[in-house]
Amino acid sequence: MQSSSVEELRRFRPPLGKGAMRTLDMLLDASGVSSSFDRFLEFERRTGFVYTRVKGRLALGYMPNLSAPKSFNEKSIHRRLFSRDPVWPIVTNKIQVRAWLSERRLDQDLAFVPILQIIEDVDRFDFREIQEPVVIKAAWASGLNIFVRDPSAQDWDVTRAQMKKWQAQAYFPRRLVWSETQMKRIYVVERMQANAPGGMLDDYKFYVFHGRVELLQIISGRGSDITYDHYDRDLNPMRDIARRGKKVGKGGKPSPQVASMIPLAERLGEQFDFARVDLYLHNGQVMFGEITQCPVNGFAAFTPVSFDFELGEKWRYDHRSIYESFIRSRAHDCVADVKHRSSPDDLEPGANWG
């Protein structure tokens, strides 16, 4: 770590301008503190979570308060940073979640996208086995997907290189997603689903608080003109609510079958104080998508901002016990760190948020 860069990070105070993230990213790149999950988490703790504060201010429109989180996004960020519940690496893993649901008989009335292949050794896998449109997904991560619409035209050497790169590199350490660090890095090959040739399925995202759906977000037009629409639990359009920076759709009344998805989402979501349950409709079947613990890593900005706090009121999140459990889990590591900390480039302790 270069001492000059570290010194700049020590003195960094988040400005309100648009260049704040760019400046901070440059300093982090030069310092090397975000080379791994553990190193970046320690940096954030010692600097009072400067990166989280700057990103939150710019993305959400307010400075997140993690000492006493009230908004939905504040609570999501707090959970992402401090929860070490062993259930998260299971239910957010694209393979293990299916067994978890089956063991608890939560998969009744649900269909699943067929898994055609599981790839552990990318070098040894014969991609000629893929003979139909598929999506290759990193089982351990979000957003690491390769869409193969025409296998005969796919450059498999490029695909293999990309998959090996994802396996080898740290998964966006600045996102600080703990569950990802606990998963084996393998891929699933899923059959591509569409309601029409070339069209992707609409995404039904149910925000479930203490077993009750309080918000439905429908994302349409993936792959072309993406729109976001919001509905209350009675499927009434919430035309005054939007995701910041996202296009709002027509907001029409959802199909009658969407109402039947609500009890399914609540059955899955009641296992947690909050979870976003993603489902799809395909040829009349309700299909499981995923269970998300922290949508958009806690930076899912809403307009108006007041709705973020209204949604937060529905979540009885015990931030103190989560943080105390986090401190206990790291006690041994902290002792070891104190004993071995001797480099002049080490960051000074900063405020801890809990």
Image (cartoon, grey):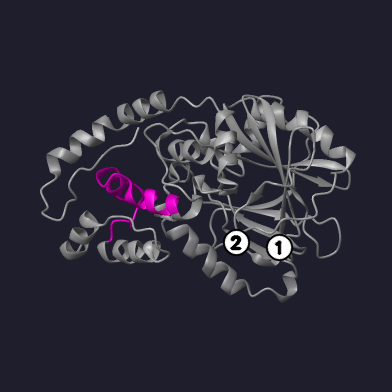
Kindly indicate the quadrant of the structure image that contains residue 93: top right
Work out whether residue 222 or residue 350 is closer to the camera in this orientation and state it: 350
**Quick check: 235 left or right of 76?**
right
Q: Which mark is residue 129?
A: 1
Work out whether residue 86 or residue 63 is closer to the camera in this orientation and state it: 63
Residue at horizontal 12%, vertical 52%? 343
Work out whether residue 234 or residue 189 is closer to the camera in this orientation and state it: 234
**Quick check: 16 left or right of 163?**
left
Q: CA distance from mark 2 to mark 1?
A: 9 Å
Is 56 in the magenta? yes
Task: Using a 10 Å C-alpha cutoff, classify the residue at mark 1 as few (fewer than 14 neighbours), some (14 to 19) or many (20 or more).
Answer: few
Q: Please name the amino acid that badge 1 sits on.
A: Glu
Q: Which residue is mark 2?
A: 125
Q: Which mark is residue 191?
A: none
Q: Which residues are magenta?
A: 32-57
Kindly indicate the quadrant of the structure image that contains residue 213: top right
In the picture, the quarter occupied by the C terminus is top left
SS of the residue at dot 1? helix
In the picture, the quarter occupied by the N terminus is bottom left
- Tell me where residue 19 appears, x and y as whole percent: 39, 66
- Tell me where residue 326 appears, x and y as whole percent: 36, 31
Work out whether residue 16 or residue 276 is closer to the camera in this orientation and state it: 16
- Tell me where residue 299 appears, x and y as whole percent: 51, 49
Q: Please name the amino acid that badge 2 sits on.
A: Phe
**Quick check: 291 left or right of 320?**
right
Is 70 in the magenta? no
> Where is 190 relative to 22, above or below?
above
- Tell me where residue 180 appears, x and y as whole percent: 47, 46
Residue at horizontal 14%, vertical 43%? 340
The answer to the question of whether label 2 and label 1 lie on touching residues, with beta carbons closer than 8 A, is: yes
Task: Using a 10 Å C-alpha cutoff, classify the residue at mark 2 as few (fewer than 14 neighbours), some (14 to 19) or many (20 or more).
Answer: few
